[in-house]
């Protein structure tokens, strides 16, 4: 199961990096047409995505023992979405051998390192600033 999940989250990360890079080269994030921004399905899809981010973040906040790591992962997830989320899951999955138990991946608590979530938060802010 761990090998399958590694492959899945590598696919998610790679596709999100490719799609966001492609979209960013097509047009600025800040130039989304008003008719798109106000379309009910755009609003519903965006709300659905962000509620999904918050749902995932609840697990991250439980796993991380440091308040600083919790806050930085929150901003990283809100700013970078599935890029930050898939990276977090991959880090967790690669801490265990392929034959390890998924239960251990899900429930193991972390000391709360802040380097990566801080870098992701800064990267997310830079992306929005450049957009």
Image: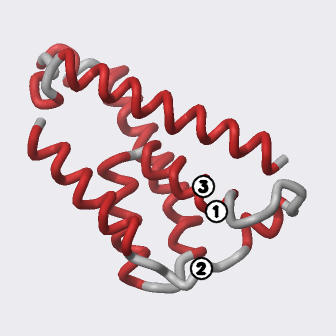
Relative to the observer, which residue lies in front, 50 or 10? 10
Alpha carbon separation for disc pair 1 and 3? 5 Å
On the rendered structure, is 19 left or right of 123? right
Q: Earlier in the sequence, mark 1 or mark 2?
A: 1
Apparent side of residue 18 relative to residue 34 in the rendered image (left or right): right
Which element carries disc 2, helix, strand or loop? loop
Q: What residue lies at 38% left-to-right and 39% top-to-bottom?
A: 47
Left or right of 32 in this view: 43: right
In-front residue for pair 54/107: 107
Q: Position of residue 58 (x, y in %)?
A: 53, 65
Q: Residue at x 53, y 77 (%)?
A: 64
Q: Position of residue 8 (x, y in %)?
A: 67, 36
User: Is residue 40 placed above or below 52 in the rendered structure?
Assistant: above
Q: Position of residue 124 (x, y in %)?
A: 25, 51
The residue labelled by disc 1 is 92
Q: Which residue is mark 3?
A: 89
Tell me the quarter of the image containing the C terminus.
top left
State the image coordinates of residue 113 (x, y, percent, origin top left): 46, 79
On screen, residue 36 above or below 66 = above
Circles 1 and 3 in contact, beta carbons < 8 Å: yes
What separation in Å lies between label 3 and label 2 (alpha carbons)? 13 Å
Badge 3, how many Cα within 10 Å: few under 14, some, many 20+? some
Q: Vertically, is 59 above or below 77?
A: below
Q: State the residue at coordinates (79%, 50%).
A: 2
Circle on res. 77: none
Q: Secondary structure at mark 3?
A: helix
- In which quarter of the view is residue 27 placed? top left
The disc label shown at residue 110, or none:
2
Identified at 61% across, 53% down, the residue is 90
Label 1 to label 2, Cα distance in Å? Answer: 9 Å
| Element at label 1 | helix
């Amino acid at each position: 199961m761990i090998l399958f999940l590694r492959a899945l989250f590598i696919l998610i990360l790679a596709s999100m990096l490719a799609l966001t890079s492609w979209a960013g080269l097509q047009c600025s994030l800040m130039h989304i047409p008003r008719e798109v921004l106000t379309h009910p399905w755009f609003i519903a899809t965006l709300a659905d995505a962000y509620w999904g981010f918050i749902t995932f973040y609840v697990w991250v906040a439980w796993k991380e023992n440091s308040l600083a790591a919790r806050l930085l992962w929150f901003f990283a997830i809100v700013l970078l979405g599935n890029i930050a989320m898939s990276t977090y899951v991959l880090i967790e999955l690669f801490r265990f051998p392929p034959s390890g138990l998924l239960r251990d991946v899900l429930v193991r608590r972390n000391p709360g390192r802040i380097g990566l979530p801080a870098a992701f938060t800064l990267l997310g802010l830079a992306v929005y600033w450049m957009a």
